Amino acid sequence: PTKEHETLKKKIHNGVVELLYSIKTELNYLKKSNSQEGDTKDAISRLSQQQRSILIDIEDLDQLNNDWKQAESKALRDLVIKRMEYIQNPKDCANAKQLLCKLNKGCGFGCQVHHLTYCFMIAYGTERTLIVESKNWRYEPGGWEVVFKPVSTTCTKTSSTPVGWKGESESKDVQTVHLPIVDGVIKPPPYMPLGIPEDLAPRLFRLHGNPSVWWVGQFMRYLLRPQKWLEDDLLKVEKEFGFENPAVGIQVRRTDKVGTEAAFHGIEEYMKHVAEWFDKCDLRLAKEQAGTKCVRRVYLATDEPNVLPEAVEKYPDYVFISDQAISKSAGLDSRYTKASLRGVVLDIFFLSKCDYLVCTFSSQVCRVAYELMQTLHPDASSFFHSLDDIYYYGGQTGHEQRAVYPHNARPGTNEIDLNVGDILGIAGNHWDGNSKGTNRRTGKVGLYPSHKVEEIIRIVKYPTYPEADS
Ligand code: GDP
């Protein structure tokens, strides 16, 4: 450890100790002062400022290892891409093992990208070349390859009649397997999210706060390599938008989702977290260069046209960038057959380029953006706030945590007991200090303090493709 390292560590230690002193002071003040609503707000605001200063110290601590992190992140990405290219481009396609994935899942763009990513992970895990069948795709009748680079250059068609997936060992000798959608897959193999490859696990644990999403992101990034014309369009639009970092991305998912798969969230709920992020940005700048402030740039993605005018009116201190504003004036590039494709592609790419995301993880569009974001930073695992679900992957094999501290449920609450070592199946985080889940030992379902558990990451023996590494 260097001197800078130790100094920052002590500063963070003091910061945390001081934070509790301040919480006690504020609580005592509120108790004595016959407090008003405004007093509570002021107290929270002062405490938040104090927390921001600790977060900045932690960022600074992280920054000390930045050169190593950047290099390690690039090395890991390059390694994985080489392996993907190897399995995707067999020399002898006629005899290669293949996995056929059909892009006709009846759902939205994010959902279809997740379908394809799940197929790719299983193809890679079972040492098969992924073949995508996408004729008459709802977002582009010409197929996936009109928009994104083909997933293979040497092997794009099935070489034998596809046989339905029956399980990894059951299908082992079949040349071309057809993988159904995740809801219909029998005997799911271990290569499903949220597992991570054994050989890379030690490196990923050092680098990344959520290796599972890092791993998913690598597959997704490979699949979503834009064709030249789309890449040009993205660059053109970036200029038109005036998109620059730092920026916070918000995705406000409304229309068909509200009341069916998710609750309604007002713009204020999103902007509260956006403001917090920019307040931290300002605090950092104030430290470095007195009197300067961050430009409050927000990329707004939404499927509801009323959201942008509402945001612009209610938040005059912010600069909103949105496809909602531009697509009406710019007209549709003739190479997009469908306007809906352009909207969602732009939104996903720009959200992923933001420095922080505020959205509902119940939406696949936002989860795709978060997954892609992981390929643009050494560790972007904490660059989000979800107003509802925790991160998950549809069809994932169990998300579990392990209790690292004991907990006695408070009487009269929904809390559950924890013994150290108990395994919990987590259902959600209430973002108020508590998570909800099932204690596998007791079978009880309820709340427990989020800080008393750690994540369990499933480590999977994936093929390591030594031929690709050489
Ligand atoms: P989910 O329903 O939000 O989980 O995500 P899906 O990708 O399955 O379906 C959502 C569909 O709604 C997308 O394909 C888009 O057509 C549209 N949509 C949802 N959110 C957005 C958004 O933020 N921007 C744009 N342009 N379209 C969206």
Image (cartoon, rainbow, N blue to C red):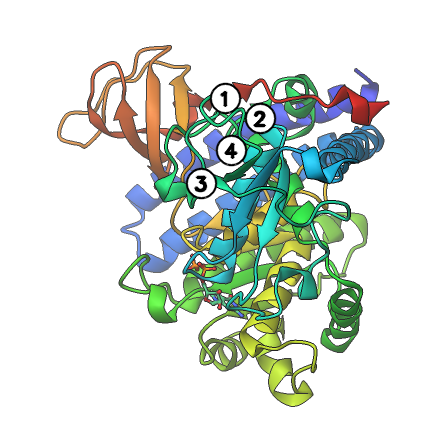
Q: CA distance from mark 3 to mark 1?
A: 14 Å
Question: Is the CB–ligand 1 distance for label 1 below 8 Å?
Answer: no
User: Decide: marks 3, 1 in contact (CB < 8 A)?
Assistant: no
Q: Quadrant of residue 324?
A: bottom right
Mark with earlier residue (4, 3): 4
Nearer to the camera, 285 or 164 = 164
The residue under label 1 is 458
Question: Is the CB–ligand 1 distance for label 4 below 8 Å?
Answer: no
Which label was assigned to residue 196? 2
User: Decide: marks 1, 2 in contact (CB < 8 A)?
Assistant: yes
Q: Quadrant of the N terminus?
A: top right
The residue furthest left is 412
Q: Nearer the viewer, mark 1 or mark 4?
A: 1
Which label was assigned to residue 392? 3
Nearer to the camera, 229 or 301 = 229
Mark with earlier residue (1, 2): 2
> Which secondary structure lies at badge 3?
loop
Q: Quadrant of residue 81?
A: top right
Give the residue type that dot 2 points to: Ile
